[in-house]
Amino acid sequence: MFKINTNVTWQDGKKLTSRDIKLQIPGVTIKYPSADTVSITSNKTFSPLESLLSRPLFKDKLIGLGQYRVSDIKYQDGYINYLKLTSPQNQTIIYRFYQSQDDLISAFKIGEVDQISLSAPPTDLETGWKIDVTKDISTNTQIFSDFS
């Protein structure tokens, strides 16, 4: 059983309810006992469940929760390669997505992106470049997903 914070509203002003949580996971049953409760059951252990539940939600037309709205989105070969988020104060966050780690590193080297996140930095970035390579875990990362 999971309780929903009913004080949260969508960017269109409507309140978040349990029925807005629309997950479709094979072998998992989802019920909505009340407007603020989601019941999730499975016959087998499903280890990625908590990570799926921690992902942000979107409704139709990319209406989400929180202050940042999707203001621009671009696709390449059917995949998102550019996402621009804008706050009511006109602050922007831009995410670029690359098809391979090599493409990402090349974009970083030519200055197309300011910051990259890799599980293990390649050795050529650790030597010969005037950059700070940190191996800290950032807990201040915003990730957006669509559960519809």
Image: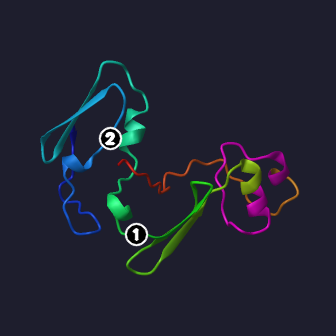
Q: Give amino acid for label 2.
A: Leu
Measuring from the top left, give residue 101's x and y in whole percent.
72, 49
Is residue 27 visible in this depiction of the protein? yes
Q: Which of 17 and 139 is in front in this view?
A: 17
Q: Earlier in the sequence, mark 1 or mark 2?
A: 2
Q: Which mark is residue 23?
A: 2
- Label 1 and label 2: CA atoms lie apart by 22 Å
128 left or right of 69 in image:
right
Which circle, 1 or 2, is nearer the viewer?
2
Q: Nearer the viewer, residue 68 or 97?
A: 97
Measuring from the top left, give residue 27's x and y in whole percent.
34, 25
| Residue extending farthest top | 43
Tag 1 residue: 69
Corner quadrant of residue 115: bottom right
SS for dot 2: loop
Residue name at image x 35 percent, y 56 percent: 58
**Above or below for 14 versus 78:** below
| Residue extending farthest left | 34
| Residue extending farthest right | 128
Residue name at image x 71 percent, y 68 percent: 112
Measuring from the top left, give residue 95's x and y in whole percent.
57, 63
Which residues, given as a range, are shown in magenta?
105-125
